[in-house]
Amino acid sequence: MLRFFFYSLIATVVWSCSSGAHEGKKATSDKLEKPVIVGEWKHIFNPNDTRSDIDTTWYTNDHCFAKGPDGKWHAYGIIGHKPIDPWKGETKFFHISADKFNQDKWEDHDYALRTKPGVEKVLWAPTIFQEPASDVSHMFYNIGNMQEHARKYTSWGFLCRADSKDMFEWKRHPLNPQFSDPGHARDAFVMKDGGKYYFYYTRAYTEVDRRSSVGLRTSPDLEHWSGPRIVHSQDSLVSTWAGGSESPFVVKRRNIFYLFVCRAHPKGDYNQTHVYWSKDPEDFPLENLVCELPTHASEIIKVSDNEWYISNTGWDKKGLFIARLEWQ
């Protein structure tokens, strides 16, 4: 259904959550909301528009958005071209910007980062965290694993950090990697709540228990990270890649936390995002399913209190799309 919707884009459609297997335990005093995709998808970036002299099969994947000191919106993410080979072809981050978030086409810039030979195997799934009172943006991302056969087993993925003051020049942290975990640990998302920093990421439950899971480490200062804990697991989706719990993203609304995870697993659906709720940002029970959304590697973007967006991308699409999101 999603592929037809994506490539036709001929009608205004509202994607809402089904009301079947959702709410699990009842949220107590705070209202449980559902994210609803409203209207058409807007194709803000097609990498083939500026690379057609090289190839016409370019795609984007996991990505992030942030507003820069120049007042513009910036986006960064995985870029590659077919034939798809994440371990060989995803070695740089695209960088685009726009004056307004809902701008029709975003400006394409030079790559934000490229792999360091002999040190970084890949560049995957950046996220950006910004302190309101700071002029530094912090990017967290995955560099893969340099071991020869790492892609064939539940190897440890390495998560790193780079900082920038202008959104163009990114300096790698001197103490990279920040940490590593099994199941090709990747797809970082960082937020702050109550004076504590939360670093969510995709991983396997353990090296031998290959359930797709979301890991969490916490910090008082973005420099010293705790040991890992599992905050969510897809018990039926088992794989070396932990593909059933990709692209975790957490939103807090009215004292309720919402975890978005992409179930891009052979037993799931490449274009399927599940949303779970919790009062505790360190525990998202599988039974607390709010809804399903027909998207891949989605980010949730708050432009203002009344203006929210969701993004969509992936190997089966030529670039990056956004649509309005409402909480109902």
Image (cartoon, helix red, strand yellow):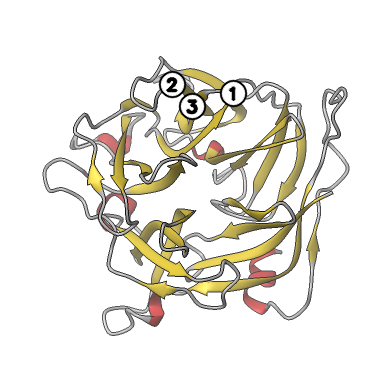
Residue that carries the numbered disc 3 in the rendered image: 197
Q: Residue at left 39%, top 78%?
A: 48
Local crowd at mark 3 within 10 Å, few (<14), some, or many (≥20)?
Answer: some
Q: Secondary structure at mark 1?
A: loop
> Along the line of sight, which residue is nearer the eye, 328 or 192?
192
Q: State the separation of the CA atoms marked 1 and 2.
A: 12 Å
**CB-based contact (under 8 Å), mark 1 and mark 2:** no
Local crowd at mark 1 within 10 Å, few (<14), some, or many (≥20)?
Answer: few
Direction top: furthest residue: 227
Disc number lying in front (1 or 3): 1
Tell me where residue 296 appears, x and y as whole percent: 57, 54
Residue that carries the numbered disc 1 in the rendered image: 194
Q: Earlier in the sequence, mark 2 or mark 3?
A: 3
Q: What type is the residue that disc 3 sits on?
A: Tyr
Q: Residue at left 57%, top 51%?
A: 299
Location of residue 271 with respect to 56 vertically, above or below: above
> Along the line of sight, which residue is nearer the eye, 182 or 128?
128
Tell me where residue 250 appears, x and y as whole percent: 60, 37
Residue 284 lies in quadrant? top right
Local crowd at mark 2 within 10 Å, few (<14), some, or many (≥20)?
Answer: some
Location of residue 228 with respect to 57 vertically, above or below: above
Tell me where residue 102 appears, x and y as whole percent: 60, 70
Tell me where residue 122 appears, x and y as whole percent: 27, 47
**CB-based contact (under 8 Å), mark 1 and mark 3:** no
Q: Earlier in the sequence, mark 1 or mark 2?
A: 1
Direction bottom: furthest residue: 53
Residue that carries the numbered disc 2 in the rendered image: 219
Q: Secondary structure at mark 3?
A: strand
Q: Point out the image quarter for the N terminus.
A: bottom right
Q: What type is the residue that disc 2 sits on?
A: Ser
Residue 70 lies in quadrant? bottom left
Q: State the separation of the CA atoms marked 1 and 3.
A: 8 Å
